[in-house]
Image: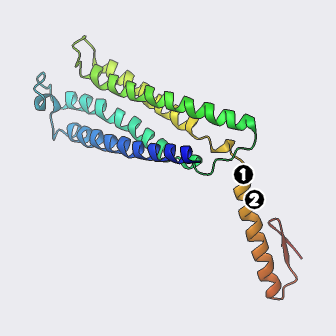
Amino acid sequence: MKAQSAIYQTEHSLAWLMSLGAIVLAVIGALVAFDVLDIRNVFGGAESLGAVQNFEDAVLLLLPAIALSLLAWTLHSGEHHLGARYATTRDEAMYKSEHSLAYIAALAALVFVALGILAGFDVLDNGNTWRDGVTWNLLAIISATLTATLHAVTHHKAATEQEDIRMIIDERVGSALQRAGSDVRVERGYERG
């Protein structure tokens, strides 16, 4: 249980880090898109070609912001680490497998984000184009979405908590109805009269 709690805390911290990265990229991307900031002049790069170039540069920042936002949301959805009970041994194996694959997909998304920015701005001077950057960034979004899908592993856990809650509510509602003198009784969520 302590290991699950530590993983939850780590994921929660990483979610905040991804959120911060997404916010920074989104703000800079928006400023570039609206021609408030010319990123090529800020970093002493090539001369900007105006509004079209600025919009293309903004896309190279806004697409990875989307990928980081998806990762932040995914890592912030870590309640499945708390109170881990599995329905079956097979469910436990699937939970762990899918969770591990989610981490691999998240790492791939981060690599694709970095490649998208580096290639799109041709930072490594390899003759990369804007389209190369957009392609890497789209792969980052796909990978981040896959991360979210694989990280949604709660369905492998037993639903005993829900049943416990339902039994408590049924019992209390039934008791309240009896105290009120009603001849209606509640059985497993259904009214009986």
**What amino acid is at disc 2?**
Glu
Q: Which residue is mark 1?
A: 159
* Secondary structure of residue under mark 2: helix
Q: Which residue is mark 2?
A: 163
Image coordinates of residue 25 in percent, x first then y, are 28, 38
137 sits to left or right of 106 = left
- The numbered disc on residue 147 is none
Task: Establish if 8 lies above or below 180.
Answer: above
114 sits to left or right of 82 = left
Of residues 14 and 127, which is closer to you in this image? 14
178 sits to left or right of 55 = right
* Secondary structure of residue under mark 1: loop
Image coordinates of residue 160 in percent, x first then y, are 73, 54
Image coordinates of residue 71 in percent, x first then y, are 44, 38
How many numbered marks are there? Answer: 2
Tell me where residue 93 sits by quadrant.
top right
Q: Residue at 56% of width from left, 50% of height from top?
A: 79
CA gap, disc 2 and disc 1:
7 Å
Of residues 119 and 2, which is closer to you in this image? 2
Q: Residue at 50% of width from left, 43% of height from top?
A: 7
Tell me where residue 130 sits by quadrant.
top left
Of residues 54 and 85, which is closer to you in this image? 85
Image coordinates of residue 170 in percent, x first then y, are 78, 70
Q: Residue at 84% of width from left, 88% of height from top?
A: 181
Quadrant showing the C terminus: bottom right
Of residues 57 and 190, which is closer to you in this image? 190
Task: Establish if 37 lies above or below 101.
Answer: below
74 sits to left or right of 56 = right
Tell me, yes or no, whether the two marked residues, 2 and 1, touch with CB atoms within 8 Å: yes
